[in-house]
Image (cartoon, grey):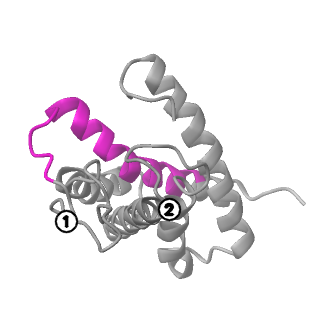
Amino acid sequence: MAADPAVLLLHLKLLLLVGVANGAALFGRTVFRDRFAFPVDAGLTLPDGRPVFGRSKTLRGLVLALACTPPAAWALGIDASTGFLIGAFAMLGDLTSSFLKRRLAFPTSSQALGLDQIPESLFPLLAVRARYGLSGVEIALMVLAFLVLELAISRLLYRLRLRDQPY
């Protein structure tokens, strides 16, 4: 059975919005450098002695994700509220990943294959699942696509010296 082009286009648009949400922080760091880079966790640590999220999770990145995804959605012909949902839940996924990495003693900005990509793509897709009638298989395939694309794009950005590390 051939895939419906309209459905594939929707999936691509949703993946692009997830990418916009997750790329907003990198964009912010590139443009603003250290300005406005206030840690989301305000430098607090938990009883395990580790930061809640780490210094690389900033209010700047969070605000940019929430500010960039609604207009990007609108530009793609998708309701801006979908863009906001995707931005918010991508950031929730990213913070969840960072929280888990700190508990597992991964250093800030270190790579944890899967843990770095799955929550930040899965959470926003689950958030818009009912709105777009996404099946579990569709979501799983989009998360897998995001993981592969994110790794490839990350390496490219590293070669262009827009990322500090190739992941």
**Residue 44 placement (x, y as % from top left):** 19, 65
Task: Give the Cα separation between the discs numbered 2 and 1.
Answer: 17 Å
Q: Residue at the location (51% across, 24% down)?
A: 156
In the structure shown, which secondary structural element does the residue marked by tag 2 occupy?
loop
Is disc 2 in contact with disc 1, using a CB cutoff of under 8 Å?
A: no
Q: In the rendered view, does 106 fall on the left or right side of 144?
A: left
Toward the viewer: 149 or 161? Answer: 161
Residue range of the region highlighted in magenta in the rendering: 12-38
Which of the image's four quarters has the N terminus? bottom right
What residue do we see at 54% from left, 53% from top? 117
Tag 1: residue type? Leu
| Magenta stretch: dominant secondary structure | helix
Please give the residue where the numbered disc 2 appears in the rendered image.
104
Compare residues 111 and 159 and report the one nearer the observer.
Answer: 111
Q: Secondary structure at mark 1?
A: loop
Q: Residue under label 1, please give it.
A: 44
Asked if residue 141 lies left or right of residue 152, the reply is: right
Is any part of residue 167 visible from this angle?
yes
The answer to whether residue 23 is magenta is yes
